[in-house]
Amino acid sequence: MLITIFSSYLLIKNRNLVQIFPKRLRELWSLWEIRSAVILSLILQIILILLGKRRKISRSSSLRFFLWFAYLSSDATATFCLSAISSTSGDTQGGSDDPNLGIMAFWAPLLVLHLGGQDTITAYSLEDNELYSRRFLGLGVQLIVAGNVIVRAWTNASLNFLVIPIFIAGIIKNGERIWALWHASRDHFRDSMLPPPDPGPNYAKYMEEYRSRTEEGFDVSLRRFIEPPIGSSSNNISFTTDRNSSLSEAEFLLYANNFFSIFKRLCADLILSFHDIENSQSFLRSRSCDEAFKLIEIELGFMYDLFYTKAAVAYSLIGGGCRRLGTFSFTITALWTFSVIKKDAYHKADVIITYLLLIGAIILEIRAVIVVLFSDWVIVWLHKHNNAVVHFLCRAIFSIRRARNRWYNTFFAKIGWSNTMSPITRWSNTILAKHRWSNTMAQYNLITFCLKDRPANCIVIRKIKSIYQSVEKYWSIDSKKVPDELKELIFQEFQRKLNAAENFKGCKNFCAYKGDWVLQQKQCYEKFCWSVDVAIDQSIILWHIATDLCYYSELDTTNKNSDPENVRNSKDMSRLLSNYMLYLLVMCPFMLPNGIGQIRFRDTCAEANVFFKDRNSILYRKEAEACKELLEVDTQIPPLEVKGDRCKSLLFDACRLAKSLNGLDTEQGWDRTKKWELISHVWVEMLSYAASQCRWNHHAEQLRRGGELLTHVWLLMAHLGITEQFQISQGHARARLIHE
């Protein structure tokens, strides 16, 4: 990248190319090319520190694109400035006597400071962590370029000596960034999770003693005992099992931090121990649904910080605190010294830009310190060091948080903006509140997608087929807040499975179910087994369409608002999960097991479009009328026997499933409450199956996109023992010789 940027700069400097522009424009560009680039570099750093952690709580695609652009442009801009300053100093004869060159050389270490990045966004994606060695090599080249600029402009002036502390601060920040990337890289992270080598008891000595005692005539026998796990962080957790007892926010953070130190092994493809699962189950069984999901949210917040920020190296009191104090002191010293030295020989614009760079660096450092002080990591550290001073600091931090939110609410209320009227108010409350993820779930509906007006009137987009298909997919995505009722449904379903499991092996077996266990419990497995004993992508499409058909078929006979509350909740939760799972299949297929879900979806949409076009009366009309027409199709003969296996459409297979579900009330005497409970529970089991089958790196990638409900379910299942990543044993067994 450095070579490409430097080559591009030399191309711009080529006089033959520049001659095509007017002389006035060439002079303006020559005067402001470096100055404008340096200011742009500072602006990009401000954007990164303000929006770096914003993506953790937002699903906005525009925010992701803007942050991605700033992340990539920040390094490129700083590198471009260093190359331009270096080229200028090389082109200037006797440049060391030029005061303007001297002040530009002072910008070089400030640009190195920018290359160190911000604490809130060290890596944009997980792949960036694997490139720490490339970053280290690039840093070496950039330091050489900056050092070359400094040496060429050295005149023993006061300004030259200010370069040294800023240069040291830049090296420290770049070292932190590379260290954080290395710490979160796959190989090092896995190695850090491995326990120390355990040679076990001395077998040779054990057998020698056994033979010796036997020869002496002793009656020797073996007795096994359970040895507690060595070095397990779970031993340090004191559990509160009283459901009525409430935990403070600091105590909850401490529990979450202790659990995170255990369950982050899932992100290294390592297994959990018998004791880890037992402890987490004991804790969650005594807590409510809200507390369980809050625990998961905090742990995933720690996971995000570990992989995407400098938390691993910057949020420690001794190492991170000393480094932050050092960089801040160096920058303050440079600003104070620059303010008192004579600046008459320098261009006024260069002096102003230098002040902006120094003040901006100080503000960025202060902002970084504030982020650290109000982070969950610091609260955990303070709570672990239990004394009066720490209690005072904890209360002060939480009081400032609450006062800050109240002040902003009062301010916006006084100027006449309410939460329902002003998007600025909503944004302010969101960014200031302690949200740990977006708490939303995307929605994608197949029938709505087929009936919706296309954004295809643009002929140019239609001709570019790949762009058109992408735009068409995103056109139909909706987003809903994850309701508390859905979390309660998921948590209660997991609790029901734990109560049904005889042992830990039974809990582990629940990972393999994708709707069949619920059907067996409801005693209708044989009736619907054909819809769940298939690939998960096929089950999702079948049950998605069937859920819509059942939902809209009841609108003619009942009023949704007149439904009993339990029926209404089951219907709403079923549709939310149905649309969410289809969204995962269409937009995030990498989070589901390998299959041909994309082919099935496209073929099903194609058949639905043909069906709707043949009935122009329902084309571009409401979904209820389309579902009614679908249910009127005679499906006595299975579609597979008519169409063969070439077409992967599941449209009319789903119609068969919907008719069977609607027939439960007449064939088996079910009421609508029982039917919708069945549908909602099947969807929860499909969700849990998909969560357990998704690789950890795909879960971690979603943390930078606002988070996914699937990821929270995955970690909650691991806490409850519904995971394949733990060993089932009776503890750490050892043997001892017993003789009489």
Image: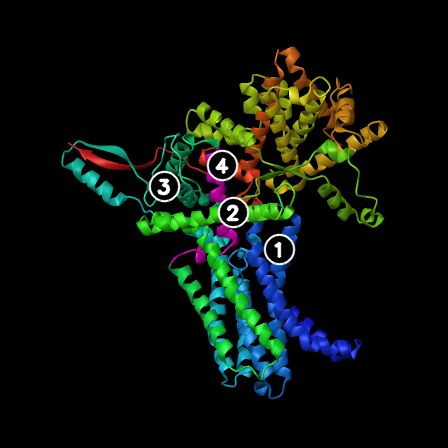
Q: Are marks 4 and 3 in contact (CB under 8 Å)?
A: no
Real-space Cα separation, disc 4 to disc 3, in angstroms: 20 Å
**Disc 3 designates what residue?**
234
**Residue, disc 4:** 293
Residue 367, above or below 525: below
Of the image marks 3 and 1, the number of the one nearer the N terminus: 1
* Residue occupying the far left of the picture: 216
Q: Which is more N-terminal, label 3 or label 4?
A: 3
Crowd class of label 4 (few under 14; some 14 to 19; many from 20; radius 10 Å):
many
From mark 4 to mark 2, how far is it between C-alphas?
23 Å
In the picture shown, does residue 144 fall above or below 262? Answer: below
Q: Which residue is mark 2?
A: 405
Q: Which residue is mark 1?
A: 67
Looking at the picture, which amino acid does disc 3 mark? Ser
Q: Is residue 309 magenta?
A: yes
Question: What are the residue bounds of the magenta stretch?
Answer: 290-317
